[in-house]
Image (cartoon, rainbow, N blue to C red):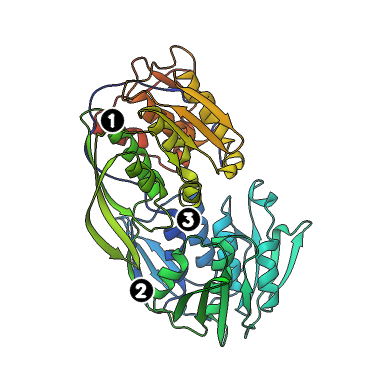
Amino acid sequence: MSHSAHARPLSIAASGPLIGTLTVPGDKSISHRSLMFAGLAVGESRISGLLEGEDVLATAGAMRAMGAQIERAADGVWHVHGVGVGGLLQPQVALDMGNSGTSTRLLMGLVASHAITATFVGDASLSKRPMARVTEPLSRMGASFTTAPGDRLPLTMRGLCPAVPIDYTLPVASAQVKSAVLLAGLNTPGTTCVIEPVPTRDHSERMLRGFGAHLTVEQTPQGRLIAITGEAELRAQDIEVPGDPSSAGFWMVAASVVPGSNVTIRNVLMNPTRIGLVTALRMMGASIEERDRRDVGGEPVADLRVRHASLTAIEVPPDLAPSMIDEYPILFVAAAFARGTTVARGAHELRVKESDRIAAMAAALGLAGVRVSEHDDGLSIEGRDGDPLPGTRDARVASLLDHRIAMSMAVAGMHARDAVIIDDAAPIATSYPAFVDTARALGAMPQWMNR
């Protein structure tokens, strides 16, 4: 993540109801995959709503280096002429993945069953992340690897064609590892199978089917068995990338807690593996209405109309954690306005996200006047039964360079008597550059401050 040397403090206090219609940034998981699969398809695909962040642009650059023609038109639509499965070309330069673990692991899968050699490099943060969980199954399929010590980047791999189909049971729940093996299976004769003991997000399966791959999913005593038939032919598609449900979550909570609000969020991805927050908010009594439910590229999408509602505290079911791990910070904000004490546990993974999100949110909400107690795996939050938060006076919430902490506390400020001041809101740009402008368009009044 690139940080500017200049902190940008943001101040926000209550300013009346939030009213209007908005769209949120395109979903990152689907943006990555749409470029990869279009780059392997025959014909021209058109992709609208692509998330144009650094991670996704790294995927575009790598697919270009391996022969796909990828252009962005002036109207923001991306045009991709694919090389066909089996048609990836030897890249002439190292593939620079920046900070993107998704790009790296999925592209390694694609390369594994092509007779080409590719070198992957990344920034300091990505270069610390171990790649063994992907190199191990791909080696069984016939790819060979030279890596930095500890199976880290920089990494050079040589694919094998024809590769060897395998049956692979995932040792850790990881959509990236699952996807890497399935993508290697695209150009591998026979059937490649992945068994997933714990379900993970299923965007690869849905989109591969949408592009015409022969892929089956069945429940077995061992877990979900996903089988892909190799030497597939993918057909070009037109894809409208749906809005990211994590980004939509901020507005769901803002509209729920600010009195008089009525907000419609258009084109939101409603994949069941991604909408734990919607489930939790509805349990609390939120008014979230799905309109025009439709299917886009194999994914369920809807417009969400969210109106102010009195929220009631809940015990958050720990089994929701995988489908809303990124949404806990904003759920904690909803809990701060509910009636009663909300207990959210079973979220150990929050300790190791961009920041320790449990400690960060406990400190931030406490500073803004909410009673919070911290557990090793979550928080208990004493709600204010709809009353505004007192605010932070002149103190400043520490965002810890974490975009989700900054946006969550900005939402908390939308129903606060005194302003909530965030020490540095610049990191919001990593996932949602238009967040502050969108807040203003809905009627909130965030103010950038001099340091």
Residue at (77%, 56%) from the top-left corner?
A: 150
Callout in the foreground (1, 3): 1
Up/down of 414 relative to 148, above or below: above
| Quarter of the rendering occupied by the N terminus | top right
Disc 3 and disc 2 in contact, CB within 8 angstroms: no
Residue 48, image quadrant: bottom left
Type of the residue with mark 3:
Val
Query: Is there any visible trace of residue 87 in the rendered image?
Result: no
Mark toward the start of the polypeptide (1 vs 3): 3
Up/down of 20 relative to 266, above or below: above
Mark toward the start of the polypeptide (2 vs 1): 2
The image's mark for residue 44 is 2
Residue lying furthest top: 394
Distance from disc 3 to disc 2, alpha carbons, whole Å, reads 19 Å
**Mark 3 lies on residue:** 56
Residue 282, image quadrant: top left
Distance from disc 2 to disc 1, alpha carbons, whole Å, reads 38 Å
* Helix, strand or loop for disc 3: helix
- Looking at the picture, tell me which residue is in the foreground, 150 or 325: 325
Disc 2 and disc 1 in contact, CB within 8 angstroms: no
Local packing at callout 2 (Cα closer than 10 Å; few below 14, some 14-19, many 20+) is some
**Mark 1 lies on residue:** 440
